Image (tube, helix red, strand yellow):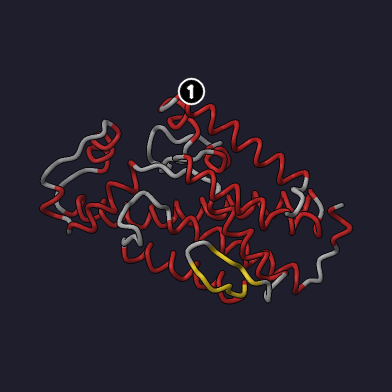
Amino acid sequence: MRNVTETVKQLIIINVLFFVGTLALGDVAYKYLALYFPENPLFQFWQPISHMFMHGGYMHIFFNMFALYSFGSALESIWGSKKFLFFYISCGLGAALLHTAVNYYYFEGGLNTLMANGFSKQEVLQLLSEGKINTKWQELLSVSDFKNFTEAYMVTAVGASGAIYGTIVAFAFMFPNAELALMFIPVPIKAKYFVPGIVLVDLYLGISGQSIFGGGGIAHFAHVGGAFFGFLIMWYWKKNQFNENRWN
């Protein structure tokens, strides 16, 4: 097995400590450290960073940390710690940015419909901030629009998945022909095929509102955002022949 590199090891330790802390503190930790919609009064400026170290359950943190170890260590061993950390955090912030932008699109669309039908923005925000809705909203919005509108405001985002997706994209850039053997796919797949495939699946699930396993609560656009920013950074570095020595 590949030796874990120093920055990857520290990131894993921080994520585990945050997870243990959430087990001890419960909802209080999520209230302050998960990523809320900016119109929500519970939003804080540090949440785009802190949400990257929060996770929703044992399997969530296990798969993210396993991916961080598997792909991140390979990148850090080539780039060095500073460059890898910059890349990792940038992808996590990119994930938060796209996730929030999509939520704004859904929220503003629903809000504009309600305002066109006599509701004031202040009235709508007041009810949502109390965790309530007006049942008349369901008559004015379609089922999917109502769901997207309310979830954009109320549902939080947690997890390192956006940063992980960026890391996986970078791995595919660096090692396109590396064969990835996954427990649920019996045949190894080259990284240059596998990575675009999972990003497209996430994009489809985000747009359609579906889930492969029938559950919800997955921030698909955060995954896509992390992958997209990872691609942009890798493309920029490659185009400009980035000098790695500046990061050592």
Task: Give the vertical position of 158 relative to 32 (above or below).
Answer: below
Left/right of residue 64 with respect to residue 84 in the rendered view: left
Q: Residue at x 71, y 71 (%)?
A: 175
Residue 32 percent coordinates (x, y)? 47, 30
Residue 63 percent coordinates (x, y)? 54, 50
Q: Quadrant of residue 169?
A: bottom right
Task: Give the vertical position of 152 relative to 245 (above or below).
Answer: above
Left/right of residue 2 with respect to residue 61 in the rendered view: right
Q: Residue at x 58, y 51 (%)?
A: 92
User: Dot 1 lies on which element?
Assistant: helix
Residue 241 percent coordinates (x, y)? 81, 71
Left/right of residue 35 with respect to residue 178 in the rendered view: left
Q: Residue at x 11, y 46 (%)?
A: 136
Total residue callouts? 1
Residue occupied by mark 1: 24
Determine crowd level at label 1: few under 14, some 14-19, many 20+ residues with C-alpha closer than 10 A: few
Task: Give the vertical position of 6 relative to 76 (above or below).
Answer: above
Q: Quadrant of residue 233?
A: bottom right
Task: Give the vertical position of 87 relative to 37 (above or below).
Answer: below
Give whichever of 2, 67 is nearer the camera.
2
Residue 168 percent coordinates (x, y)? 62, 62
Q: Residue furthest top?
A: 24
Give, as a three-letter code, the residue at label 1.
Ala
Quarter occupied by the N terminus: bottom right
Give whichever of 131, 161 is nearer the camera.
161
